[in-house]
């Protein structure tokens, strides 16, 4: 496999760039039997569950775009490779025009700042769904908020502050020629899918609809402890799975096995995932 797999979607050229592997654990998956998770992943309780963290460079019409900004250097030592990958494919961070954020979680936005807290993407406009921005950046802390929600809200305000003047809040719909935002809530309130359409071809950049394909494709009800609303995330996952299969739309996932390009197919009562490189 090439280091930076690339595919065409009509006039779009989309290149997968890894930010590195994230080391998680089986404890992150809830709503499914532990023995089932161990069997599906081949990982025993207490062992590492590695998940890829993928970004996608989108080239079209002379613009250089990116989906999600990487994890930066504060999460885990294996992460934060996105900037060097971008340079390797001639898409240096300082040349990125626009970043499509699927949602505001650490592994998608902490990479907007470097180790010293400086902006990594000095000219990029950040495009984020208004529902996502409202929840993490504007909302007053509520008594019922979990610690995870409170902490992430504070972190996202800090990370996005240097970009304050170039955050573009969008609603559902076409935000650029051939690029449509579709809110798919649950994992976060404004979690957004980006649908690329050109010359009859389509690719859905679906962010975190799936975190662990080995478990959540055959077991759609497996939720993540990081889901803000696990039940809504489950319902959304089912809706998106049905849609991409019925519409035969290829997908690109932030945590699908690198490069994150693939397709879903029906299999018996459920689904299976087929990698496309
Ligand atoms: Zn994520």
Image (tube, rainbow, N blue to C red):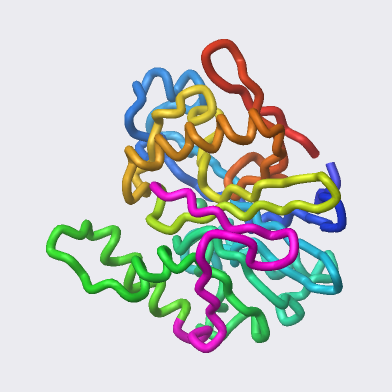
The residue lying furthest to the left in this view is 143
Quadrant showing the C terminus: top right
Q: Is residue 104 magenta?
A: no
| Image coords of residue 166 (percent x, y) | 56, 84
Please name the residue shown 48% across and 49% down the image.
184
Query: Please, is residue 57 above or below residue 250 in the view?
Result: below
Please name the residue shown 15% across and 58% down the image.
144
In this view of the protein, which residue sits in the foreground, 215 or 265? 265
Residues in magenta, as a range: 161-186
Please name the residue shown 52% across and 88% down the image.
165
In this view of the protein, which residue sits in the foreground, 25 or 243? 243
The residue lying furthest to the top in this view is 268
Q: Is residue 3 visible?
A: no
What is the tally of numbered marks visible in this picture?
A: 0
Query: Please, is residue 5 above or below residue 266 in the view?
Result: below
| Image coords of residue 63 (percent x, y) | 80, 73
Query: Please, is residue 98 above or below residue 76 in the view?
Result: below
- In this rendering, would 79 be left or right of 11? left
- In this rendering, would 149 be left or right of 128? left
Residue 243 lies in quadrant: top right
In this view of the protein, which residue sits in the foreground, 208 or 81? 208
Please name the residue shown 58% across and 83% down the image.
119
Query: Please, is residue 46 above or below residue 115 in the view?
Result: above
The residue lying furthest to the front in this view is 173
Q: Is residue 197 visible?
A: yes
| Image coords of residue 109 (percent x, y) | 52, 67
| Image coords of residue 38 (percent x, y) | 44, 23
Quadrant showing the N terminus: top right
């Amino acid at each position: 496999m090439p280091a930076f797999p690339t595919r065409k979607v009509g006039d779009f050229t989309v290149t997968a760039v890894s930010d590195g592997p994230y080391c998680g654990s089986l404890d992150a998956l809830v709503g499914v039997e532990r023995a089932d998770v161990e069997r599906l992943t081949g990982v025993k309780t207490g062992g590492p569950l590695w998940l890829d963290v993928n970004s996608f460079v989108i080239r079209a019409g002379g613009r250089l775009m990116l989906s999600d900004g990487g994890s930066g250097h504060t999460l885990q030592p294996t992460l934060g490779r996105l900037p060097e990958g971008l340079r390797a494919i001639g898409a240096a961070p300082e040349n990125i025009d626009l970043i499509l954020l699927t949602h505001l979680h650490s592994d998608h936005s902490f990479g907007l700042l470097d180790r010293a807290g400086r902006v990594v993407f000095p000219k990029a406009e950040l495009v984020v769904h208004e529902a996502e921005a409202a929840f993490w950046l504007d909302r007053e802390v509520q008594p019922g908020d979990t610690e995870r929600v409170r902490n992430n809200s504070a972190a996202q305000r800090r990370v996005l502050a240097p970009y304050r003047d170039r955050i573009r809040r969008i609603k559902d719909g076409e935000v650029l020629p051939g690029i449509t935002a579709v809110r798919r809530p649950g994992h976060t309130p404004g979690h957004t899918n980006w649908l690329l359409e050109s010359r009859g071809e389509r690719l859905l950049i679906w962010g975190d609809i799936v975190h662990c394909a080995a478990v959540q494709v055959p077991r759609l009800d497996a939720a993540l402890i990081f889901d803000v609303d696990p039940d809504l995330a489950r319902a959304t996952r089912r809706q998106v799975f049905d849609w991409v299969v019925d519409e035969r739309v290829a997908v690109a996932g932030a945590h699908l096995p690198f490069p994150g390009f693939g397709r879903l197919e029906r299999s018996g009562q459920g689904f299976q995932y087929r990698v496309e490189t």
